[in-house]
Image: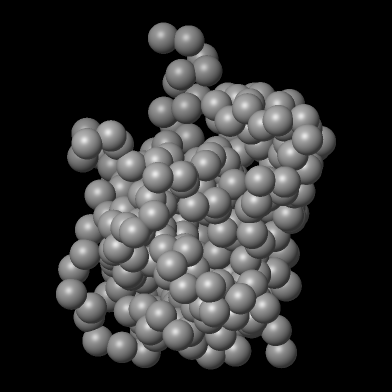
Amino acid sequence: MHTSFEQFAAASMLGQTDAPPRSNGELLFQRTWEGRAFGVAIALSKKGHYEWEDFRRQLISSIAEWEDKHGNNDPEWDYYQRWLLALERLLIEANLLTYQELESRTKDLLACEQGAA
Amino acid sequence: MSERFAYRDNREAYNAARVKALESLLVEKGIITSEVVDKVIRYCEEDIGPFNGAKIVAKAWVDPAYKARLLADTPAAIAEMKFAGGMTGVEGENMQCVENTSQVHNLIVCTLCSCYPWPILGLPPYWFKDPTYRARAVREPRAVLRDFGLELDDSVEVRVWDSSAQVRWFVLPERPPGTEGETEENLAKLVTAESMQGAAKVKPLPAH
């Protein structure tokens, strides 16, 4: 079985209690959802719901799909959007979620936000 | 407002809702807890970063035997450092260090996605994941380095290392001149993430 760094990073992290806070002063995620999508992908791999390599494979194809259709300098490039797409596909492939329930929950949340605005 | 801006706003709202939907469903099904996700994010913000790599580089500069071990068996040499999170274990065998010299300059890239030596450099910067960098680093590394502000002599050989699931590369930069006799701790402060990616050299100490 092949394991990779991300999985390893997650493994070393989840195996221990909280380390003392140390800030390197860098903003890792521009938007909250990026961090959540990132954390969910790693946590599921750590929990053994899929191999990290499976996620990497999905990420490679979601990036390649975008690059096939856009120029390299296209400002619409959004790394975490490709990450999110990869995660979504893997969750469905691994039978953790269905496309229908994901669609329906997304719709509910969007409607809820619009209602609140 | 142009259609493009409207599209972007919608997309942002959609992405945020999509991630919320996905996480909430996984939590309800008992597959994951939000605390675990919090922990992953916190780990990446606090425990991993270029400060780990900087310690490795500084040690290699002052200790030739350590440097030899680092180049010969990178994971074992990193394990010696005993970083927070205990970076020992089989997965560490994936990291490989390459040395910059006056004749050779190394640059790292991941052409297919965004593979990067997380435990010692943290998460990759924006440009490392960008399609333009990933394509250009292999095709025209000298031009890319020039864009980063690094002009290399024609006599210097540039080597590009493409990371993958098998190997995550990082660079042992050259020790800057004028740092003889400096402590390991002070040397580590000079080492930047960029220097360990091969995107820059380590700058000498500012003049006193």
Residue B31 visible (yes or no): no
Residue A110 position (above or below residue B121)? above
The image shows residue B201 at horizontal and vertical percentages of 52, 42
The quadrant holding residue B83 is: bottom left
The quadrant holding residue A111 is: top left
The image shows residue B31 at horizontal and vertical percentages of 44, 82
Residue B155 position (above or below residue B129)? above
Q: Decide which of A58, A2 is in the foreground and name it.
A: A2
Q: Decide which of A6, B56 is in the foreground and name it.
A: B56
Instruction: Count the labels in the image.
Output: 0
Say whether residue B191 is left or right of residue A24.
right
Q: Residue at x 66, y 62 (%)?
A: B98
Say whether residue B45 is left or right of residue B78.
left
Say whether residue A45 is left or right of residue B37.
right
Q: Decide which of A100, B39 is in the foreground and name it.
A: B39
The image shows residue A73 at horizontal and vertical percentages of 66, 24
Where's the N terminus of chain A, which quadrant?
bottom right
Say whether residue A75 is left or right of residue B37.
right
Residue B184 visible (yes or no): yes
In the displayed orientation, state which residue is furthest to the top: B1
Q: Residue at x 64, y 59 (%)?
A: B99
Residue B110 position (above or below residue B31)? above
Q: Residue at x 70, y 84 (%)?
A: A2
Where's the C terminus of chain A, which quadrant?
top left
Q: How is the image coloured?
A: one colour
Residue A44 position (above or below residue A24)? below
The image shows residue B108 at horizontal and vertical percentages of 65, 51
Q: Residue at x 30, y 36 (%)?
A: B206
Q: Decide which of B16, B114 is in the foreground and name it.
A: B114
